[in-house]
Image (tube, rainbow, N blue to C red):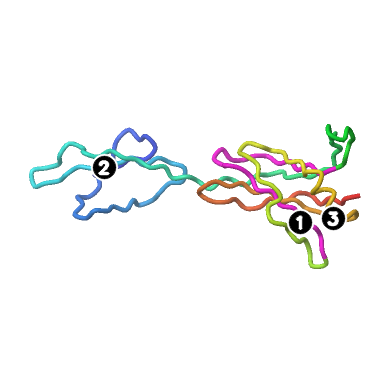
């Protein structure tokens, strides 16, 4: 059996295998691993009879510069403006499938975080809290938002916004 990683110019020959499995010394994140499988006899190797590969995915990098601000949004249905919070961040990954956004409301024992307020797609860097969610927050409440990226390999750490108080 021979293998190479990420389109290397040549394959590396592994030891002759007498078993049906092989362990790579390392699996590099976000890389392609290619294999050529041969039948081996005392007279040598056959032509490759199996070519296969797999891709290892990296956990996405956490976003940065998470910020929240109070904004006024125009509602086309009611034809009125309403206040809400807009959360922005910088996407630092090219392998995320999306972002989870949470909100924490300050309580007597620190901030209490809700389950995910929203999930947005990859490459999105802004989320505006829906009117109903904003209206459900008591006036004078202090909030912090947090954002993390995700994909099938895992979830990044949270990155926190500034504090903001609802008027």
**Pointer 2: what residue?**
2
| Identity of the residue furthest to the left in this view | 43
Other residues around mark 2 within 10 Å, as few (<14) / some (14–19) / many (≥20): some
The answer to whether residue 87 is magenta is yes
**Pointer 1: what residue?**
104
| Marker count (numbered) | 3
Asked which secondary structure carries label 2, the reply is strand
Q: Is residue 85 left or right of residue 159?
A: right
Q: Quadrant of the N terminus?
A: top left
Q: Nearer the viewer, residue 155 or 118?
A: 118
Q: How far apart are the two marked residues, 1 and 2, measured between alpha carbons? A: 52 Å
Give the image location of residue 126, x and y in percent.
72, 39
Give the mark toward the camera: 2 or 3. Answer: 3
Other residues around mark 1 within 10 Å, as few (<14) / some (14–19) / many (≥20): some
Q: How far apart are the two marked residues, 3 and 1, measured between alpha carbons? A: 8 Å
Give the image location of residue 159, x and y in percent.
68, 50
Q: How far apart are the two marked residues, 2 and 3, measured between alpha carbons? A: 59 Å
The magenta-colored residue range is 84-107
Residue at figure coordinates x 61%, y 42% from the top left: 98
Give the mark toward the camera: 1 or 2. Answer: 1
Asked which secondary structure carries label 3, the reply is strand
Disc number placed over residue 142 in the picture, else none: 3
Disc number placed over residue 12 in the picture, else none: none
Residue at figure coordinates x 23%, y 42% from the top left: 37
């Amino acid at each position: 059996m021979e293998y190479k990683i990420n389109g290397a110019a040549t394959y590396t020959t592994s030891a002759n295998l007498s078993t049906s499995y092989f362990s790579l010394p390392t699996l590099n994140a976000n890389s392609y691993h290619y294999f050529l499988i041969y039948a081996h006899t005392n007279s040598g190797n056959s032509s490759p009879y199996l070519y296969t590969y797999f891709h290892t995915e990296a956990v996405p990098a956490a976003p940065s510069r998470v910020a929240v601000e109070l904004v006024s949004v125009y509602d086309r249905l009611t034809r009125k403006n309403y206040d809400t919070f807009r959360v922005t961040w910088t996407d630092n990954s090219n392998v995320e499938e999306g972002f989870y956004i949470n909100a924490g409301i300050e309580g007597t024992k620190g901030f209490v975080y809700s389950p995910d307020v929203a999930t947005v797609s990859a490459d999105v860097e802004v989320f505006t809290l829906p009117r109903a969610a904003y209206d459900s927050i008591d006036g004078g409440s202090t909030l912090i938002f947090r954002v993390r990226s995700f994909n099938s390999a895992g979830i990044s750490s949270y990155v926190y916004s500034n504090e903001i108080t609802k008027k």
